[in-house]
Amino acid sequence: MSLVQARLKYLIELKEKPVQNLLYENENSTIPRRSLLKGGLATGVIALLSGCESRVDLRVRKGLKRPVGVSDRSWKNIRSQFILKRGVTYMNNASLGMPPAIVAEAVCEGYETISKEPLHGKHGLQEKILSETVPNLAKTFGAERDEVILTRNASEALHMQAAGLKLKQGDEVIITTQEHPAGQRPWMFRQKRDGIVVKEVFIPSPLESADDVMERFEDAITKRTRAISFCHVTRGGHHYPVKKLASMARDHGLVTLVDGAQAAGQFPIDLKDLGCDTYAVSLHKWMLAPAGTGFLYVRKDSREKIRSIFAPNPIIEKAPDFDPPGTKDFPVRAAIGTALDFVNTLGVENIEKRCRFLSDYLKSGLEEIKGVKLLSGQMSDISAPGSTIFEKEGLDAMASVPMMEERIGTHIDEHQRDGHNAIRISTHIYNNRAEIDRLLDAIARA
C-alpha cells in the first residue's frame, strides 16, 4: 500500500470521528500525526470531511437540562452550550443573537445534507420544516400552523403585513414615534404609493405607564383610522400593553399589527391570547435561532383584511399564499427547530426570570455610578426583561461601543433615538454577574 493510499484509508476510517482525533488520538496509527500535518491532509479533512465539527470547536457539552433558580451557578451548564470566542463578552443580543453550538451544528449538517445529495436532501429538509419546525413554532407561540409564515426576519414580515393591509386613499394608520425604521418604512411606502395617512403618536421615553400608552393611542383615533401599528417591545426596551391595545382596537373596528422582533424569546407569548391581527418576529435575536430567520403571524379571522403580496390568486385552499416565492435557505430554516428545542427545554418562563435577574443586577449597579440616568423602567409591565438603556453624562453613546470592545472585549450597542444619547445593554441567559461587574467598572471609568 502506497503512502497516499494509507493516508486515504486512515482518513476514511476517521471520517465520523471528531476533528481533534486527527491530532490527539489514534496513537496506534501507522501514519504519524506530524506527517499528516506536514502533508496538509489534516487541514483538508477538517475542511471537507468534518466540516461541522471544525466550525463549533467540539468542546464537550454536557446534557442540556432545565435550570432551577436564576443564579449564575444554576445556569453554568447553559453557558457552556455556547461557543463564544475566549476573551469576548457579548451583550448585544437585541441586535443579533448568539446561537448555541447545537444550532450552529444543525445549520452545518443541513448544508452537508444538500451538498451530498441535493435532491433528496432538499426534500428531506422541506419535509422537516413543514412537519416539525412550523408546527412546533406555532405551538410555542400559541398559534395554528397555517397562521405562521416563515420569513428571513421581522423586517420582511413587517413589510408583508403593511403592504398587504387593505387600505384606500385617505385611510389612516397610527404608528408611534418609537418605531424601528423597519416598522416605519413600509407605512411610508404605502403613504407614497397609495395616499394613505400615517399618523405618529408621541410616546415618551422612559414610559410613564401602560395606561398612558393606551390613552395616547385612543386620543389619536379618528373616523378615518383603519389600523394601529406598534412594537411589543421597542428598541429601547419599553414594553407596550399589546393585549389591551388590541382589545381597544377591536372595539373601534381597527386592525392591530405588531412588531415582535424584540419580544419573542424574552418572555412567553400567546398570540391567540394577545388578540392582534398580525405579528412580526425575528427568531435570530432572543430566540437564538440562526441569522436570517423569522416569521409572520396572520390571524385566521383576519385574512380578509390582509392580502398576500406574492400570489395573484389571494385565496389558495381557503388560506392566502403569504409565503415569499423561490428557493428557501432550507438548512437555516430547519435549524429553527433545534433552537426551539433548546429554548423550550430551558423554558421561556425561566429565560424571562434569568434575563430579569441579570438586568436588575445591572440596573442596581448603574444607579451607583455618578452621572448615570436609567431609561429602562423598573416595573416589569413596562420594561423588557433583558434590555437595559441608560445615559451617562459626558459619555457619547456611539463612542462607547468601540471603547468597551477595546478596553474589556465587550460588545454593546448605542441607542441614539427618542432624543437620547444612550447606551443599550442586552443581557441574555449566557451572561453572568462577573461580566456585568467588569462592564460597570469600565462605565464608571469611562
Image: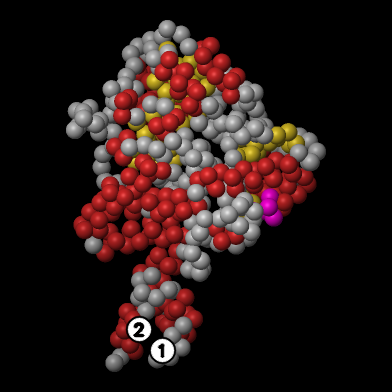
Q: Secondary structure at mark 1?
A: loop
Dot 2 crowding, Cα within 10 Å, few <14, some 14–19, many 20+: some
Q: CA distance from mark 2 to mark 1?
A: 8 Å
Q: Report the quarter where the C terminus lies.
A: top right
Q: Earlier in the sequence, mark 2 or mark 1?
A: 2
Q: Is residue 357 left or right of residue 230?
A: right
Q: Is residue 314 above or below residue 6?
A: above
Which is the main secondary structure of the residues drawn in magenta? Answer: helix
Contact between marks 2 and 1 (CB within 8 A): the answer is: yes
Tell me the residue that label 1 is attached to: 29
Rendering coords of residue 78 (x, y %): 55, 58
Tell me the residue that label 2 is attached to: 10
Q: Is residue 90 left or right of residue 188?
A: right
Dot 1 crowding, Cα within 10 Å, few <14, some 14–19, many 20+: few
Amino acid on which the number 1 mark rests in the picture = Ser
Q: Secondary structure at mark 2?
A: helix
What residue is rendered at 34% in x and 52% in y?
334
The reply to whether residue 115 is in sight is yes
The residues colored magenta run 432-436
What residue is rendered at 64% in x and 23% in y?
208
Rendering coords of residue 235 (x, y %): 55, 34
Residue most extreme to the front: 68
**Colour scheme of the rendered structure:** secondary structure
What residue is rendered at 46% in x and 83% in y?
25
What residue is rendered at 21% in x and 30% in y?
318
